[in-house]
Structure formats: structure tokens, C-alpha cells
Image: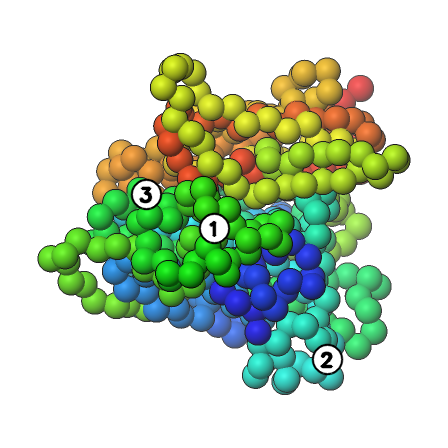
């Protein structure tokens, strides 16, 4: 069984077991949906359905890191147009970030040996009968493998893909005999009710959590080595069931939460154009070994406070793209404190800048001081092309403040071809 350090940050498969729409209703329900499948318009034939994940229990200060296997997902040969997620309570009410912080949710694709389905369901043993299929990104091993995923910015970040582009799934000609395609969620949520330092807790600062006495003697980092004593915070200090320190006078109830997620899709046909999905990481330290490129993504980093300068902190990575394509969509997964993040071409042309939106109120989706959205780039199809072998530069910019567990992940969808009517001449 996977230990409850976030599944989606695993380095390689050997460590798997130890590291962690609405006009016409078709009146057909999928298991676990909270509404019917519906068709948005007669013209687009886009369908949608909303699902609830299995529940997970939180309590004041508690960290929850879970892998939710075999989630409900549209069946058949389809093209996904969007995938949106939020945290809700037992009554279906949206939960604000200052109560339960959604650090991240990742949707990961895998195929399962049909003969072992019952065993896997009962045991959660992913070492046998499972093969994971990651995105097209270059991070090493099985690091950042998901097809969709964000964090606290989920409610305010569009995932819509423009027509006629979509993520192709369920192609029977590409599925191994005896296997079926499935999906899982990897999630981390942190209940910050009653904590000494809500923001610090949401950054997983080690000193704010009740860590075991032998924590640094037994906890492995992303490189498979013991965490250094100067590791101040991040993913490894937010393991499942650990506790952020609470105010002495605070008492609050436990409660059960779920992910509510809406997927929009089309049935696949010759009119759809498939996309490739890449996650680029601003911590990626690329080196070459002869003709082989070796990626060394760290997934997160610490930002030290620079008392000698008021300039923001810049994290930069130069990332070669073995295979290029036409840029259709771009955005970033960042944390509170981000100024912006920009992806440049090799000639320093701006491919996409993603800017943050910060909340100003109390309602879910507009929580004061929290990052609640990132802007999305939708270039005119055919107007931006990344060449095969082109070296892209990713710059993630944060405020000049001490911060742990900062992330700089850039998401891009690329198309190999553009319909003639959209192609820029």
C-alpha cells in the first residue's frame, strides 16, 4: 500500500510503496454523479457530469494526504474539454481555504489488469496489476505525472480547452489487451481551523507541525536520501495524519469532506484535434550526459528572505523540448505569494505569462489574502509554435518573503496540427 506522502511526487516506481453543462438532459446517470449527463448545445455536443469523490475526514490542524483509487470518470473513446475541482462538505457546500486549505489535487491515469481488479480494490496494492501512464512532461521518473491538477487556485483558474482541441482518452486501439483505463486522485488538504499560523501551516512549515521525534532520521527526500536537518518545510513535513499546532483554547469538530469535480467532454471523432500535455517545473536542473538529457525536478523549493534587497525572488529553469508543437493553452500551478510566472521561447519571446488573482472577501473562491486563481493564455491557434529541440525558459516570481514549499509548475497543451481555417499564414 502507498504510504501517505503525496503519491504524485514519487520519484520512481521502485519507491511506489514507500513514498509517498445544461440544456438537454440525457437522463442517464453515471455512478457517483451528483447530476445527469447533459449536453451543452446541439452544435457542440459537449457533455458534462459532476461527481463526488469518496469522503475523507478532517479535524482542526489535521493534514490529510490520500490516494483515491478508481474515481468516477466518463467512459468510452472521448475528448476531455475541462476538469474542475473544489472541496465541499457533507451538505455540498463549498469549503473556504481558510478552513480547509486545498494544497493540491492531481488526477492520474493508470491501466489495470482486469484479472486483478478485485485484489487491487481490496488491498490498494499498486505494485502488481497496475501500469501508470504519465503526461508528456519531462520530469524524471514518476514525478508530476498528472493530466489535471491544481491547488487553492482551482476555483478561479479556467481549464477549458477551445474547440476543436481536446485531450483524447479511451482509444481502444491504444489499450493493452486485458487492461482497462482508470483514474485516481492524489490529494493533500490541511485543516487550518484553530492553528497558530494558518498561512505557515498551509506552507507545511516543519516547526508548526507536531513531527515525530525521529522525523529527520527516517524521512526520505525527493532524491531518496534522508532529509537534511535544514529542511524548513514543504511536502515532506505534511504527511498524512500529522497535525499543525493548535491554539490552546481551540476546540473544533471533525467533519467529512469530498472533492466535487465536473468534467466536460465530447465523443471522439475525426473533427477533434488531440493535444499533448506538459508540466514544466522551474526547479528542473537539466544536465546532459552525451546526447541524453537528464532532468532533476525538485517539485518545490524554499524562498529565503533577502534583507539586502526588495526585489522579488526569481526561480528560473532552462528546459529543452524534445518535441514541440502549437501552443493552445498555458497556465501555472503556484502558491500564495506568487507575483507571476512566464514561459519564454529560446529567442526570449513571451509564450505565456500567468498572473495571480488574490481573494478579498470571506466566501469560498474569494478568500482574503489567498491565491484564488491564475490567468490562462489562449493564443490564436497557429500563432505560437514551439520548435522541436527548442530550449524554453521558465521564470517563477514570488514576493521577497520567507516561504516554504513554493511551487512553480507551468502547464501547456500542444497540438501537432492546426485546422486549416485557424492556421496562421
Q: Residues within 10 Å of mark 1 (few under 14, many from 20)?
A: many
Number of marks in the rendered image:
3
Marker disc for residue 114:
2
- Residue at image x 35%, y 55%? 190
Q: Secondary structure at mark 3?
A: helix
Q: Earlier in the sequence, mark 2 or mark 3?
A: 2
Marker disc for residue 235:
1
Q: Position of residue 252 (x, y in %)?
A: 18, 63
Marker disc for residue 106:
none
Q: Seen in the image, is 124 located left or right of residue 60?
A: right
Q: Nearer the viewer, residue 205 or 351?
A: 205
Q: CA distance from mark 2 to mark 3?
A: 44 Å
Q: Nearer the viewer, residue 366 or 341?
A: 341
Residue 71 sits above or below residue 12 on the image: below
- Residue at image x 28%, y 67%? 255
Write down the residue under mark 3. 200
Seen as rendered, the residue at the extreme left is: 249
Amino acid at each position: 500500500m502507498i504510504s501517505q506522502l503525496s503519491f504524485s511526487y514519487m520519484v520512481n516506481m521502485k519507491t511506489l510503496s514507500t513514498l509517498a453543462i445544461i440544456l438537454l438532459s440525457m437522463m442517464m446517470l453515471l455512478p457517483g454523479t451528483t447530476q445527469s449527463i447533459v449536453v451543452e448545445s446541439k452544435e457542440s455536443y459537449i457533455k458534462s457530469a459532476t461527481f463526488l469523490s469518496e469522503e475523507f475526514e478532517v479535524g482542526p490542524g489535521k493534514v490529510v494526504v490520500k490516494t483515491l483509487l478508481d474515481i468516477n470518470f466518463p467512459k468510452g473513446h472521448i475528448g476531455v474539454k475541462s476538469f474542475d475541482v473544489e472541496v465541499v462538505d457533507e451538505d455540498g457546500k463549498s469549503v473556504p481555504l481558510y478552513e480547509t486549505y486545498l494544497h493540491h489535487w492531481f488526477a492520474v491515469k493508470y491501466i489495470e489488469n482486469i484479472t486483478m481488479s478485485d485484489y487491487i480494490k481490496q488491498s490498494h496494492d499498486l505494485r502488481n496489476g497496475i501500469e501508470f501512464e504519465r503526461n508528456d512532461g519531462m520530469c524524471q521518473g514518476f514525478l508530476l505525472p498528472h493530466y489535471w491538477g491544481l491547488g487553492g487556485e482551482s476555483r478561479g483558474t479556467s481549464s477549458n480547452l477551445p474547440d476543436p482541441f481536446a485531450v483524447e482518452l479511451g482509444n481502444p486501439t491504444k489499450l493493452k489487451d486485458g487492461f482497462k483505463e482508470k483514474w485516481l486522485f492524489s490529494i493533500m488538504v490541511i485543516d487550518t481551523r484553530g492553528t497558530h499560523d494558518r498561512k505557515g501551516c498551509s506552507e507545511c512549515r516543519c516547526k508548526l507541525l507536531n513531527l515525530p521525534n525521529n522525523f529527520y532520521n527516517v524521512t526520505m527526500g525527493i532524491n531518496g536520501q534522508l532529509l537534511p536537518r535544514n529542511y524548513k518545510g514543504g511536502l515532506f513535513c505534511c504527511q498524512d495524519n500529522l497535525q499543525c499546532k493548535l491554539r490552546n483554547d481551540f476546540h473544533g469538530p471533525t467533519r467529512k469532506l469530498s472533492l466535487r469535480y465536473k468534467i466536460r467532454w465530447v465523443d471522439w471523432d475525426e473533427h477533434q484535434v488531440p493535444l499533448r500535455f506538459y508540466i514544466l517545473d522551474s526547479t528542473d536542473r537539466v544536465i546532459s550526459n552525451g546526447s541524453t538529457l537528464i532532468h532533476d525536478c525538485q517539485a518545490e523549493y524554499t524562498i529565503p528572505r533577502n534583507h539586502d534587497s526588495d526585489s522579488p525572488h526569481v526561480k528560473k529553469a532552462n528546459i529543452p523540448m524534445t518535441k514541440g508543437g502549437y501552443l493552445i493553452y498555458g497556465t501555472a500551478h503556484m502558491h500564495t505569494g506568487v507575483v507571476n510566472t512566464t514561459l519564454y521561447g529560446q529567442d526570449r519571446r513571451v509564450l505565456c505569462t500567468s498572473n495571480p488573482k488574490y481573494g478579498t472577501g470571506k466566501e469560498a473562491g474569494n478568500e482574503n489574502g489567498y491565491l484564488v486563481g491564475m490567468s490562462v493564455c489562449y493564443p490564436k491557434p497557429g500563432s505560437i509554435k514551439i520548435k522541436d529541440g527548442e530550449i524554453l525558459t521558465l521564470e517563477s516570481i514570488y514576493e521577497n518573503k520567507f516561504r516554504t514549499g513554493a511551487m512553480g509548475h507551468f502547464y501547456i497543451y500542444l497540438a501537432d496540427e492546426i485546422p486549416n481555417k485557424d492556421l496562421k499564414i
